[in-house]
Amino acid sequence: VAGEVLEELCGQMGITDLQEVQEFALFLIKGEGELVRPLSSHEYLNSVVTDQDMSLHSRRLGWETPLHFDHPTYTETHYGQPAPEQGPGSLSIVGASSVMWHHMAHPVQGGPWPQAQMTQTVHPRQELLAYIPKPLQWQVKIANIKSLVDQELRQMRGYSSQRAQIDFIETTSLLPLFGYTVYVVLRVSKLVLPGPVLLGLNRQHLVLMDPSSQKLCCSIPLKDLQRLHLLSPLEDNGPPGLELNYGSADNPQTIWLELPQAQELQHTIVFLLEGSMSSTQWPGLS
């Protein structure tokens, strides 16, 4: 079952504390992200992995346990979770300086970053653009980012791959949305902003952040959610949406979000809610 596989994976990272194990989830992926959802601990893998284009991967959804870099596999796994976010699509989420750590942690031929290469400028414009979500590229000054990355790379000497990975994680841990699963939301019903917003999801809250100012625009406790409803795209070939009903009976609230990963977000919210309940199924899914 999924829970046993997850415990085994955590054991390979040196994680034995049950509370920390419960901060991870096993995700089912079909094709190129056609279906992405977390598996409950009691699900049998041979019942859900039914096609050749399906795969499983682990993801940390809770970050309450302090980080501890006492096992190489632990370090590599935790670096690997934020690192894909450093690839195409999220420089604006974690900050420009983290790109430098990302490249230091990918040394040439598995060794430390060559000193000769560190003294050269890096990151042509197109390479840097690949790290930034397309909807947010107009808000970023590429020249400033390139100057920062070049300067910091030249100042580094003799970093090992593992040391760079740890520093990368520690750098990102200081940023506003560390500890959240982050999505780029194209439109939000209650906000009037010139561009997309960032959505952060953890085991307690769903938050919306203005990527330009990095100020929170909205925060919804997950315990206040009453109902989730997946919405069809508003336009042909457009992304789907997710409607959230929350609040009390005396003060009901509704907000809808438009994003390509609407179904994944819905599945993940339900997974987090059911994990905090004594019953096995949250009643607000539709």
Image (tube, grey):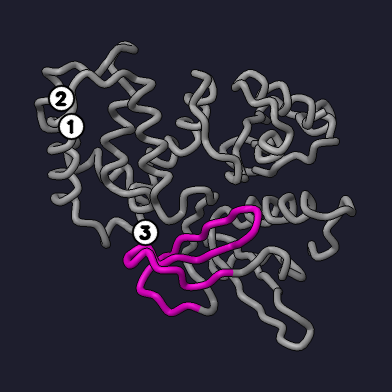
Going by the image, does 67 lie left or right of 11? Answer: left
Which sits in the foreground, 231 or 168? 168
The quarter of the rendered structure image containing the C terminus is bottom right
Judge the density around disc 3: few (<14), some (14-19), many (≥20) Cα neighbours within 10 Å.
some
Going by the image, does 171 lie left or right of 158? Answer: right
Which sits in the foreground, 226 or 70? 70
Could you give the CA–CA distance between mark 1 and mark 3, rounded to whole angstroms? Answer: 28 Å
Q: Judging from the image, what secondary structure is the residue with disc 1 in? A: helix
Which disc is residue 153 wearing? 1
Question: What residue sits right under mark 2 in the picture?
Answer: 118
Whichever of callouts 3 and 2 sits on the residue coming sooner in the sequence is: 2
Q: Name which residue type carries label 1.
A: Leu
The answer to whether residue 190 is visible is yes
Judge the density around disc 1: few (<14), some (14-19), many (≥20) Cα neighbours within 10 Å.
many
Q: Name which residue type carries label 2.
A: Met
Give the magenta range: 191-219
| Labels 1 & 2 near each other (Cβ < 8 A) | yes
The quarter of the rendered structure image containing the N terminus is top right
Percent coordinates x, y for residue 259 in the rendering: 53, 60
> Which is closer to the viewer, label 3 or label 2?
2
Question: Is residue 194 a member of the stretch shown in magenta?
Answer: yes
Q: Judging from the image, what secondary structure is the residue with disc 3 in? A: helix
Question: What residue sits right under mark 3 in the picture?
Answer: 135
Question: What residue appears at the point 43 percent right and 42 percent down from the top-left corner?
Answer: 85
Question: What residue appears at the point 79 percent right and 33 percent down from the top-left corner?
Answer: 48
